[in-house]
Amino acid sequence: MILSDIKILEAIESGDIVIEPYDRECLGTNSYDVHLGKWLATYRDEVLDARRHNPIDLFEIPEEGFVLQPGSLYLGVTEEYTETHHTVPFLEGKSSVGRLGIDIHATAGKGDVGFCNTWTLEISCTQPVRVYAGMPIGQLIYFLVDGEIERFYNKKADAKYNTRTDKPVESMMWKNRF
């Protein structure tokens, strides 16, 4: 079941959902709009290796915006820091963003209960498009969880994305055993 605007507000008031900064105008009927932060990153190497740490180059989006190019993967970040303690957050692109040919996540649209951080975005586009820091980029939808939680994400010793940041975070796949 998806939380309605009233249920999202109740969860914010109880501390079950945290959104910083929070703006009531960003609350939709059953979602909360999030915005593109000022940092983007690209991978330094053309060939990425799932068993190695792949370094990234960070850069700030200039005031005049930045033109995304097709065929490139950009890591972005939400302005909003979020916490969810009893719901599962899903991040989806806004339809207006999709209509510009921008995808904001390749596969990682679902957060875990206990995820406490900004959201790294895996941004790609179908044609060149200029983006701006602070533009609406996605929406968080919250699903109820049925049952007790044994291991919250922020309590897992092996959680790879627990360090609070305002910058995009590269893949930590290399920390897995395979």
Image (spheres, grey):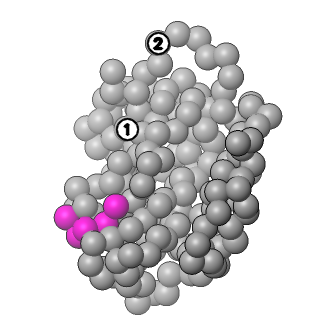
Q: Position of residue 46 (x, y in %)?
A: 57, 77
In the drawing, what numbered circle is on residue 106? none
Residue positioned most to the left: 99
Which kind of residue does numbered mark 1 sit on? Ile
Image quadrant occupied by the N terminus: top left
Q: Residue at x 29, y 36 (%)?
A: 30
Give the side of residue 97 with respect to residue 163, left or right: left
Helix, strand or loop for disc 1? strand
Task: Give the answer, above or below, for where 95 lies relative to 159.
Answer: below
| Mark carried by residue 141 | 1
Is any atom of residue 74 visible in this view?
yes
Other-residue count near label 1 (Cα within 10 Å), few / some / many at <14 / 14–19 / ≥20? many
Residue 167 in the image: x percent, y percent? Answer: 63, 66
Q: Which residue does the image show at 42% across and 39% down from the upper left? A: 90
Q: Position of residue 85 (x, y in %)?
A: 59, 28
Which residues fall within the magenta stretch? 99-103
Q: Is residue 78 left or right of residue 6?
A: right
- Magenta-colored stretch includes residue 101: yes
Frontmost residue, 22 versus 157: 157
104 versus 16 height, above or below: below
Amino acid type, callout 2: Asp
Q: Is residue 176 left or right of residue 46?
A: right
Q: Taking the image as drawn, is residue 172 in sight? A: no
Q: Secondary structure at mark 2?
A: loop
Asked where in the image residue 129 lies, by quadrant, the reply is: bottom left
Q: Nearer the viewer, residue 110 or 54?
A: 54
Q: Is residue 39 left or right of residue 105?
A: right
View extreme (right): residue = 157
- Which dot marks residue 146? 2
Residue found at the far front of this picture: 178
| Residue closest to the eye, 43 or 75 | 43
